[in-house]
Image: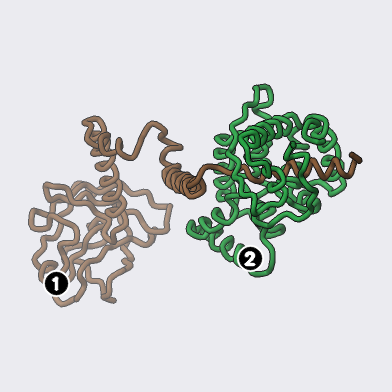
Chain colours: A brown, B green
Amino acid sequence: MNEEESNERLRQLLRLKRHEVPPPGYYPRFQDGVLGRIRALEAERARSFWHRWFPRVSVGSVAEWGRRPAFLNVGAAAALLAAVAAWSWIDSSTAVDSRVESSGSIASEAALPVGSSDVDLPPPPPVSLGPEVAEVGAWRTPEAAATAAVPAVDPAWASGLAFPSPRVSWSARSRSPVPAAGFSSTNPLPEGLFRLPDGAGVESYRVRFTGSSR
Amino acid sequence: MDPIAESTVSTRVPSRTLPRTPSGADSGTEVAHWVRRAQAGDLAAYDHLVSEFRERIYGLCYHMTGHHEDANDLAQDAFVKAWQALRNFKGDSSFYTWIYRIAVNTCLNHLKLRRNRTQHLSLDDLDLQPESDPDLVALVSEKTPRRDASLAELQRRLNEAMLKLSEDHRTVVTLHDIQGLPHDEIARILGINPGTVRSRLFYAHQQLQGWLSDWMK
C-alpha cells in the first residue's frame, strides 16, 4: 500500500468517528442545560452587587435581620439622626432666622451689620414674645401681625449700646419700612421681627443693619 | 473475509454524515440576525444559535476528549462563555469561527489540566446507517456478530489512538478528518497559518497509521 492509499485508508477509518453520536434525546436536554445555566448566571449577576459586599447575606435573610432588636435600634437611631439633620437644614434655610423655643421666647440672632466686619456687637438678650407669638411664621396675615406683641428690649442691655441709625433693608414687598413706635437709634430692636402697621400688606419680614455710621 | 479489507476507496462522503457547516448567503444572514438579537440580550435568539451549532460543538469536544460526560460539560461551558463574551464579538470573523475558537480553547484548557491523569474513554454509540455512507457500507457489509465486535474494537482503538496524539495534533485531526473543515478555516479558528495546519496533519497521520496498522491492510 503506497502512502496515498494509506492516507486514504486512515481517513476512511477516522470518518467512522462521525457516526459516534450521543444517546437519543440528548441534544434537547443539552440545550435546556445551556439556557438554564445562562439564566442562573444572569440572576446571579443581578444579585452580584449585594453578594459582593455582603457575601453572607442572602435576600431572604435581610427580612430576618430587620426583625432583630439590635438592627431595629440602629435603624431607628439612623432614621432619627437623618430626620434631625433634615430639620436643621430646612430650618436654617428659611427666610426668618429666628428659632422659637417651646416656651414661646425668641432667641434672636446677633444684631450684626450685613456686609461689615467693623462693628462688633454683643448678642442681644433673649426676648419674650409671649405665647401668642410662639412660632416663627405665625405672622402670616396682616391680622396676625397686628395682634402680635412687640418684643420688649431689656433697658439695661440697651443702655450699654450705642447703635448707629439703622439703615434698614427690606426683603418684603413694602417699600416703606416703618419701625414700631417707641424705637430709636439708641433703643433699637434687635435683629429680628418688625411689626408693621395695619394694611402694610406684608406677611413676614426681617431687618438687618446694613452698616455703621460711626 | 474481513469486511474492512474488502472496503472500497470512496471519496464521496454524504453530507448527512458531515456536520452541517453554514454556507450560502441565507444561512449566514440568518445567523447574523440571531447574533445581533442575542447581543441585545435576547435569550431566545441565542437559543437559535445554540440549536444551530450544538452538534458541531459537542462533536468537537467529544472527539477531543473521547469522553461523553466531559464533552457535555465542555460544550455547555463553551456556549455559556460565548454568551458572556457575545458583546465583544465584533463580526471580524464569522460567528461559526468565533464559537469554534471558544470551544477549542475550552477543550485545550481542560486537557492541559488533565494532562497528568489517566484519560479514560467514555464513548458514544456508533449510529450505523449503512445506506447513508458508502464507507460505512463497506465496513458493515458482513452482517454477523463478528462485524459488531470488529466495529466496537475499531472504535475503541481509534479513540485510544486519538488520545495518544498531542492536543494540537488531535485538534487538527478532529477539525479536518472528522468534522471536515478546510485547512484555511482551521487556520482561522486556531490562529495559525495554513502551512502549520498541513504539517500538523501530516505528522498526526503518520502516528495514527502506526498505531492502527492492524486496520491499515
Disc 2 and disc 1: Cα gap in Å? 83 Å
- Amino acid type, residue under disc 2 in the picture: Ser
Asked if the residues shown at circle 2 and circle 1 are in contact, with their CB atoms under 8 angstroms apart, the answer is no
- Amino acid type, residue under disc 1 in the picture: Pro
Left or right placement of residue A193 versus residue A171 in this view? left
Q: Which residue is mark 1?
A: A142
Q: Quadrant of the C terminus of chain B?
A: top right
> Front-most of B167 and A146?
B167
Residue B28 visible somewhere in the drawing: yes
Q: Which mark is residue A128?
A: none
Residue at 82 percent of width and 45 percent of height: A8
The image quadrant that residue A60 belongs to is top left
Q: Which mark is residue B27?
A: 2
Residue B109 visible somewhere in the drawing: no
Residue B155's spot in the image, x, y percent?
67, 35
Against B46, residue B214 (above or below) is above
Q: Chain of mark 2?
A: B
Residue B135's spot in the image, x, y percent?
72, 48
> Front-most of B87 and A118?
B87
- Would you call the spot at circle 2 few (<14 residues within 10 Å), some (14-19), or many (20 or more)? few
Against A70, residue A92 (above or below) is below
Residue at 58 percent of width and 60 percent of height: B35
